[in-house]
Image: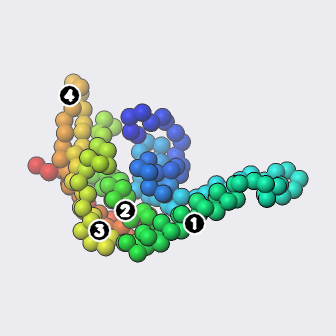
Amino acid sequence: MQPGERARRPGWYPDPAGQPVERWWTGIQWSGGCRPYRVPRPARRAGGRGNSAASPIPWIAGAFALVLVLFAGFAAVNGGSLCGSDIGAYTACQGFLDEEIGAPSTASYPALAQATITRTGANEWQVHAYLTTETATGFEIQHDWTCVATYVEEDRWRGNAALLE
């Protein structure tokens, strides 16, 4: 959870980095899993179809859906899924590093903009960043790390991460 974020239940939420996807919140941190943003359907009025001709909601939802379709087309031409992105690679690498080192609960990662993320192939990224941990006496220590992540499909990533000496 980033500073300033309030606790929330696990579930799908708009991507915190502003990508047009929803990202899975585990209840503790953002996962590498994401899916295309789902446009909420307007609630139907009881007892009928409602007055959709007078409501701008269908037009707004249609325009938003068109933008998502265009963006998805752009993403497909430029390397695949919306989830196969810099933010997806960065989030997946955080998970790989947490698994590799058993990151303590005091561990925190920098914002996406502070990481160096390089796309090295069609579905492969190399990520360099740091991890900040706090000692028992309250001192913060920064650890540099690196990761190679490959987007497989269906919100699945594979890769490995390691602390740098």
Label 1: state its secondary structure: helix
**Which residue corresponds to the image point at 26% horizontal and 46% vertical from the top-left?**
114
Residue 136 or 40: which is nearer the viewer?
Answer: 40
Toward the left, the furthest residue is 165
Question: Residue, x 53% and y 68% (percent of image)?
Answer: 69
Closest to the observer, 99 or 134: 134
Three-letter amino acid code of the residue under disc 4? Phe
Could you give the CA–CA distance between mark 3 and mark 1, rounded to whole angstroms?
28 Å
Q: Earlier in the sequence, mark 3 or mark 1?
A: 1
> Is the Cβ of the residue at disc 2 closer than 8 Å to that at disc 4?
no
- Marked residue nearer the N-terminal end (1 or 4): 1
Residue 51 against residue 29 in the figure, above or below: below
The residue that label 4 is drawn on is 139
Q: Position of residue 3 (x, y in %)?
A: 38, 34
Nearer mark to the viewer, of 3 and 1: 1
- Residue 124, numbered label: 3
Q: Amino acid at mark 3?
A: Glu
At numbered mark 2, what does the secondary structure look like: helix, strand or loop?
A: loop
Whole-angstrom CA distance, mark 2 to mark 4, is: 34 Å
Residue under numbered circle 2: 85
Q: Is residue 74 visible?
A: yes
- Taking the spot 41% from the left edge, 45% from the top edge, the residue there is 29
Return the x and y of residue 13 as percentages of the image width and height: 52, 49
**Dot in front, 1 or 2:** 1
Instruction: Return the residue at label 1.
Output: 66
SS state under label 3: strand
Residue for point 20% across, 28% down: 139
Which sits in the foreground, 105 or 117? 117
**Residue 151, image quadrant:** bottom left
Which quadrant does the N terminus fall into?
A: top left
Q: Amino acid at mark 2?
A: Ser
Give amino acid for label 1.
Leu
